[in-house]
Image (cartoon, rainbow, N blue to C red):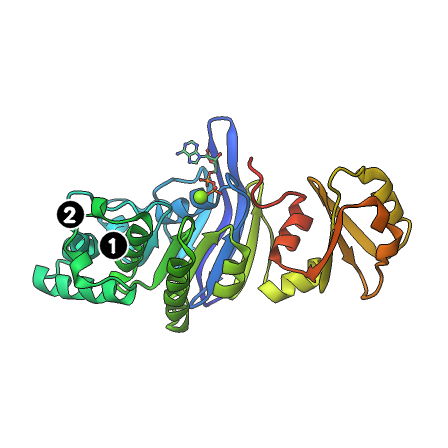
Amino acid sequence: MADDHIVLSGVRKSFGPKQVLNGIELAVPKGHSMVVIGGSGTGKSVMLKCILGIIRPDEGSIRVAGEEVTKLTGKARDDYLQRFGMLFQGAALFDSLPVWENVAFGLIQGRRMARAKARDIAMEKLGQVGLGEDVGKLYPAELSGGMQKRVGLARAIAAEPEIIFFDEPTTGLDPQARHLVWQKLRGLRAQGVTMLLTTHYMDEAAHLCDRIVIIDRGKIIEEGTPDGLIEKHAGKEVIEVQLGDHDAAPVIHELLRHDGLNVERFEDILYVFPQREGEFDPKRIEEHVERIIYRRANLEDVFLKLTGRGLAAGE
Ligand SMILES: Nc1ncnc2c1ncn2[C@@H]1O[C@H](COP(=O)(O)OP(=O)(O)O)[C@@H](O)[C@H]1O
Ligand SMILES: [Mg+2]
């Protein structure tokens, strides 16, 4: 599409014998926010690093605003990186610089801005993520993990980039800090910044993006809006059947005797997806399980159904 800002096609990357990206196809339209979800170790961070040129893909094309970027070097690459704001897992701040200078780093080094002006902007951005001038004068080691992450966020937005990458922006944050980050991200989205995020918090994905892509075993296996994906793969309602010490086989057998139910098992829980409302009759299995819970279907169910694995499951 003409207004695609970032386009990956056929991107592959292996480390030694281990194939991590196995032909990634992805298009992020300009001004959209897209979330990549996938289990840990599935290549989300490697994919972002390929787009930034931190990791060079073995094969495939990456175009940003129409320009092939996989082979950029030197000044062309520095200029290219100026378009991005990024926040990686772990805020990666410079310990030897005060907080404000961390935030202002790209303005001073990349854009050659005068220090006093860059400092004013840094303080303003810190204010936008809920940190005062007093924090700006501290050193990163004097801050909590959550505050460091907010500083990382302030740094990512300091130069008002056209594209923002956030790699698990809220992992490890307390709920209050998490909501602050969300609020900021929603603001950026409203301003029309193109955003690519990764997360394994499903509520975050549903909150923050226009579209979701699901990555599994180095490939994008599905793409859609949060509601669209839920509707398509999980329906409206999910029944969680907690087995406890009970045997799964007879319960599954009983559930599958009737049409109209899909059943996924993950550890000691059966996830039952009725194709139509009222399809599920709890009386049939009640005595053979520990607990039955009814709830609305969510993105976690979509992920489980498509990959057969919970998000927390490793490689
Ligand atoms: N620089 C590297 N060298 C070797 N292996 C790597 C490197 N970076 C990532 N990997 C491996 O690639 C896989 C995907 O990593 P990553 O993209 O970080 O996963 P995640 O989806 O959790 O972000 C992992 O198995 C990881 O160990
Ligand atoms: Mg990662």
What residue appears at the point 69 percent right and 50 percent down from the top-left corner? 305
Q: Nearer the viewer, residue 91 or 248?
A: 248
**Residue 135 seen:** yes
Question: Residue 269, percent across and down?
Answer: 71, 45
Question: Residue 310, percent across and down?
Answer: 62, 45
| Label whose residue precedes the other's in the sequence (1 or 2) | 1
Question: Residue 203, percent across and down?
Answer: 53, 59
Q: Which residue is mark 1?
A: 79
Q: Is residue 273 left or right of residue 196?
A: right
What residue appears at the point 41 percent right and 63 percent down from the top-left corner? 179
**For numbered disc 2, what is the local secondary structure?**
loop
In this rendering, the answer to whether 210 lies above or below 240 is below
Q: Nearer the viewer, residue 298 or 2?
A: 298
* Amino acid type indicated by mark 2: Leu
Q: Is residue 49 left or right of residue 227?
A: left
Determine which quarter of the picture holds residue 6. bottom left
Which label number is shown at residue 97?
2
